[in-house]
Amino acid sequence: MFKKALLIVFVAATMLSCGKKNVSTCQDKVCTEEFAMILMLFKDKDGPVKSLSKLTVINKRTNQPVDRGSAATINTTPGYYLIIDDRSTKGLSESGDDILITATDSTGTQTKTAIIKVAGGACACHIKKLSGPDELQFN
């Protein structure tokens, strides 16, 4: 009796799985284990800034904030801040999206903006910076 029930379950599972089709359009793309990120250097007249009072990063196509996660608070080199990384790959277009960066200095007296263009896409393994500045200068 147990063998019959097991056989029926096996046949049913096999038949149900036959109707499923692979809907992936990425053709089984193989990606490396690298993790790409884009950092920006923020400077003032004395060199790299020690801190910013506010930093926002917005994808202009979607008008949504870029997920910078907990890594956004990691600042191992003075003046460098994480702008975008591979966690945002699928939220970007293949042709590239304009990313609006708005930073306010630590005193809150100056706000500067920049736009960089970053590509990704549903099948992209990593983000890729297409254009834009590498640093932002406060007066």
Image: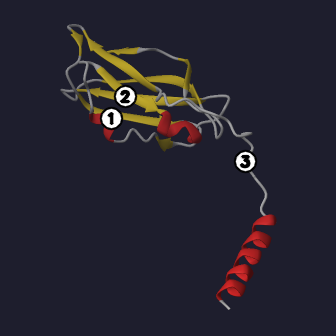
Identified at 49% across, 24% down, the residue is 115
Q: Residue 79: x percent and y percent? A: 27, 18
Picture layout, residue 19 above or below residue 29:
below
Q: Distance from label 1 to label 2 (Cα)?
A: 5 Å
In the rendered structure, which disc, 1 or 2, sits on the residue that comes first in sequence?
1
The amino acid sitting under disc 2 is Leu
Q: Residue 46: x percent and y percent? A: 20, 8
Marks 1 and 2 in Cβ contact (< 8 Å): yes
Location of mark 2 (residue): 82
Q: Quadrant of residue 11?
A: bottom right
The amino acid sitting under disc 1 is Ala
Location of mark 1 (residue): 72
Identified at 67% across, 36% down, the residue is 29
Location of mark 3 (residue): 24
In the rendered view of the protein, which quadrant contains the N terminus?
Answer: bottom right
Picture layout, residue 118 above or below residue 6:
above
Picture layout, residue 51 above or below residue 122:
above
In the rendered view of the protein, which quadrant contains the C terminus?
Answer: top left
Mark 1 neighbour class, 10 Å CA radius: few under 14, some 14 to 19, many 20 or more: some
In this view of the protein, which residue sits in the foreground, 111 or 78? Answer: 78
